Image: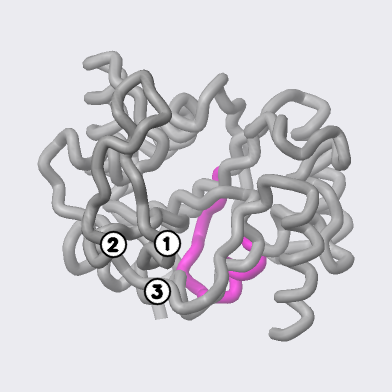
Amino acid sequence: MSAPDDILILLAAGSAQRMQAVVDDKITALLAGQPVFLHSLKTFQATGLIGRVVITYRNEEQKARMQALLAQHPTGDLRIEFVPGGDSRQESVLAALTACEDHTGLVHIHDGARPLVTTDAIRKVREKAREMGGAILAGRAADTVKIAKEHSTSVGSSPDRALVWTAETPQVFRTAIVLKAYRKVAELGRKVTDDSSAVEYVGQDVALVENPSVNLKLTRPADFVLAEAILKTR
């Protein structure tokens, strides 16, 4: 059996402003007895697909804290490296991808604040990305979505809910494709908030892979309570 060749980019450089100072750093905070970022890292490792992990970090203090936590929670011979993040998610992803530019396989880009991702979901989105060149984990919209008028809080339109999906992570692509895409949007001066939005600029189709499991992103203090409750049911 060949060694795993996929790369995981784990985004950990976010500011956690909406945590209302309840936790100093949501990425290294404990969730069900384990640091948040290690939940998803170990889930990816358990798939047997990942040969290298690139973690973006906010500052040297956070990097040192993550390194210390990794020492306390060994991950075997998994290759892990750190890349300084930027002021935005977009800048952090580009920095991490640049560190991987010689890679010819698939890269999984995942928010470090999504600790509930499952091995089954990772494998499904990876398989679709291998087939098409790009795929993202996503959920069908449960609520009716409203598009506001520009510079207004008035309703401008109501798209058909059957066509609306909410993007999650991981988002998986051939490394060369997504790196080309991020360089393109940087060249054009465009802002994107997820990876598939960047890839759309280079004409690459991206498959939507429905996720039947909860894949919560820890954004507010109450999310920790909910995430811990979900982990107890698994």
Q: Amino acid at mark 1?
A: Asp
Q: Amino acid at mark 3?
A: Ser
Which of these two is toward me, 44 or 191? Answer: 191
Badge 2 element: helix
Q: Residue at image x 24%, y 42%? A: 157
Q: Amino acid at mark 2?
A: Arg
Task: Name the residue beneath numbered marker 2.
Answer: 161
- Crowd tier of the residue under label 1, counting other residues whose Cα lies within 10 Å: few below 14, some 14–19, many 20 or above: few
- Circles 3 and 1: CB distance less than 8 Å? no
Rendering coords of residue 211 (x, y %): 43, 72
Q: Is residue 216 within the magenta segment?
A: no
Task: Name the residue beneath numbered marker 1.
Answer: 143
State the separation of the CA atoms marked 1 and 2.
7 Å
Q: Which residues are magenta?
A: 40-54
State the separation of the CA atoms marked 3 and 1.
44 Å
Q: Along the horizontal axis of the image, is 219 left or right of 122? A: right
Badge 3 element: loop
Q: Which mark is residue 2?
A: 3
- The picture quadrant where one finds residue 22 is top right
- Crowd tier of the residue under label 2, counting other residues whose Cα lies within 10 Å: few below 14, some 14–19, many 20 or above: some
Badge 1 element: loop
Rendering coords of residue 189 (x, y %): 29, 14
Q: Which mark sits nearer the N-terminus, 3 or 2?
A: 3
Q: Is residue 45 within the magenta segment?
A: yes
Q: Which mark sits nearer the N-terminus, 3 or 1?
A: 3
Rendering coords of residue 140 (x, y %): 36, 67
Let me know if residue 78 appears in the view: no
119 versus 35 height, above or below? below
- Circles 1 and 2: CB distance less than 8 Å? yes
- Crowd tier of the residue under label 3, counting other residues whose Cα lies within 10 Å: few below 14, some 14–19, many 20 or above: few
Q: Residue at image x 85%, y 33%? A: 21
Rendering coords of residue 216 (x, y %): 60, 61
